[in-house]
Amino acid sequence: MSKGSPEEIKIASHGLRGTIAQTLADPALTHVDDSDNVVLKHHGSYQQDDRDLRAQLNKEKKEKAWSFMVRSKMPGGRVTAAQWLIHDDICTKAAGTLRLTTRQGIQLHGVLKGELKNLIASVNRSGLTTMGACGDVVRNVMGPASPIKNFVHADTQNLAEEISRRTLWRSSGYAEIWLDGEKIELLSECNLPDDVEDPLYGKVWLPRKFKMGIAIAPQNDVDIFSQDVGFVPHVVGNTVEGYSIFIGGGFGMSHGQLSTRPFLAQPLGYVKRANVVDVTLAIVTTQRDHGNREERKLARMKYLVETKGIEWFRTEVQSRVPGVEIAPVKEIKFDTVEDNLGWHEQGDGNWFCAVYVAQGRIKDVDGPRYRSAFREIAQSLKLPFVITPNTNLIIADIAPDQRAAVTTILAKHNIPLPDGMTATRKVAHACVALPTCGLSLSESERVFGGVLDGIDTILRELKLEDEPILIRMTGCPNGCARPYNADIGFVGRAPGKYAMFVGGSIRGDRLAGLEKKVVLLADIPNEVRPLLEAYAVNRTPNERFTDFWGRTRVNGAAPTPEQFHIEFTERAAKKAGEKELSVVE
C-alpha cells in the first residue's frame, strides 16, 4: 500500500471527514486537495474541472476551472414530484442541466465550491441523499423501472430500499459537514458517535465501489450481469419466494492491460426471501475482508471471484450466514435490456408514460425542452417519476383524466415520441465524458447523437429501423455506459479514436469481443455498415442481431479473456504514444 494511497487516506479520514469542512469554510479555496477528493467521493461528489478550458488556462498559468459533480441516490430510481422540483431548482446553481444516470440517479455538473454545501443539504432535506452515491461503498441500489402495481414489483422495490438502508455508511461526519448536525430521518441510523466503528464497513470501508441491481425476468433493464451483485425474484403463486443471486460482474478495464477486463456476474445461489438481505451483507463483508487493497485496478469484487473461484466465494458467504440455505439459482430467461417506452397501464387503473431522454440530459436547449416539460408536470400534476437504467424518465401514477394533460405538456415542449425513432436509437446510450469527466479520453455524449444519425440512415436504407440493435459508447475504458455487453460498443482510446467491440447481447448476458482496436469517430457509421449489411442479407426470419451474431460469429459463447484483449496486448499504445491508456477504472 503506497503512502498517501486511497486506503491510507480512508483510514486516516476520521470517519470520512477529512478536512472537507475546513475547506468549505475557506472562501479563498476553489477546490479540495487530493486527500479530501478521495474522501469527498463517499459523500456523493467528484471534483472536476472544465477540460474544454484546461489547455488555455494552463497556457495562461491559471488554475483549472474547478467545479464539482454531485450525485443523488434513489433506490429503484423513484423520485417524488417535490423531490424532482428541488433538483430542478438547485441545478440552476450548477450547469443548468440534470443528468440522469445509468444507475437510476441524478447528477448535477458544474457546482462551484461555494454552492456545494447548500446544494447537498437541499438534496437531503428532500428525503433523498448523496451519501454513498460515489466512493468505496455500496452505491445506489437499482431496481425494475416500470411502476407496475403488483406484488413482484412491490417486493423488488422494498428489497432495493432495504438493502440501500442497511448499506449506508455510518458516521456523524456526513451530517456535521453538510447539515451542521441537523437531524434528518433518512440518516438517523447513520449518526454514530466518533468512537463507534461502522458495523458494515469498519475503518477501512470497501476496497472499491460496489454495485447492485434487481431485475424481473424477462426484462433485464438493470443489466444484472454487469453488477457486483444481481438479484432476480422467483415467484411461487402470489408470493416472491426468494431470489437468485449473481455475483462478480463489472465492466471497468484499462486498455492494453490483460489483468484488467470486464466480467459478467456468475450464479452464487438461490436464497429464500427472508434471508436475502443477510446473504447480501455477507457478500459485502467477504469483499471487505478479502478484496485486493494493494492494487486499486484489481480491487473490484469481480477479481476476487476470478482469483478465488465461485465455489470458494460461495463457501465463504455460507460461513457468514450459518443455517441459511444457498441453493442453486432458478432457471431464468431474459429477453431484453430495453425500456418500455410510451404509454402503459400500471395495473391499478392508472397509467405510466416512459419518455425517451437523449443520453439522460435534462435541458432546455438544442431541441426538446425536457427540463420545462418535467417541471410543469411536477408542478401542475404532482406526478412522481422513475429514472430508468437506460437514462429515460417514466412519469408514473397518471390518472386516466390526466393523460390528455401529460400529452399536451410533452407536445408543447417538443418532447419526441418514440414512434418515429429507430429501435436502435431507443436503446442506445453514451456516457457523459468530456468536458467534465476527468477520466475521459475522447468524446461520448456530445457526439453520440451525430453518430446515431449516421447509423439511422443505414438502418433505414437496409429496412432495419425496427430491429433493436444495442449500441453504446463511452469516452474511456471504465465502461459507465456498459459497452462491453452491447451488440456494438465504442470505447474511447484517444481524442477522436475508439476501440470497437461487437457481439454482446440485447439481453445483457454476453460479453462483446474486440472487433477493431482503433476506429475514427467520423468513420463509425461506415464501420458499422458491413455488420448491418451482413445481418440484413443473412438473418433468418425474425432473428435479432444478437442471435444472428451468436449464430454466425461466436456461437453464443462469451470470448475468453485472451480473445477479449486480442490486439490490445500488442504494442499499439506505445506506438501511438497514448500515455492516457493506463487510466484506472
Image: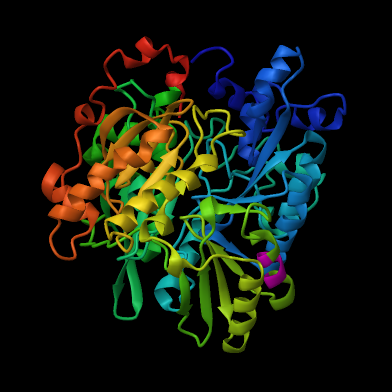
Residue pushed farthest right? 27
Q: Residue at x 32, y 64 (%)?
A: 466
Count of numbered tags: 0
Closer to the camera, 24 or 339? Answer: 339
Closer to the camera, 41 or 364? Answer: 364
Residue 490 can be seen, yes or no? yes
Q: Residue at x 69, y 47 (%)?
A: 191
Closer to the camera, 512 or 211? Answer: 512
Closer to the camera, 544 or 302? Answer: 544
Majority secondary structure in the magenta region: helix
**Placement of 327 over or under 525, stated as above or below:** below
Q: How is the image coloured?
A: rainbow
Residue pushed farthest front? 461
Residue 202: % across, % down: 54, 35
Residue 68: % across, % down: 69, 36
Q: Quadrant of the C terminus?
A: top left
Residue 269: % across, % down: 26, 53
What is the quadrant of residue 513 in the picture? top left
Q: Which residues are magenta?
A: 373-377
What is the quadrant of residue 498 in the picture? top left
Left-right relation of 294 to 413: left
Residue 248 can be seen, yes or no? no
**Placement of 80 over or under 249, stated as above or below:** below
Q: Residue at x 49, y 85 (%)?
A: 348
Left-right relation of 231 to 168: left
Residue 102: % across, % down: 49, 50
Whether the magenta-drawn stretch holds residue 1 is answered as no
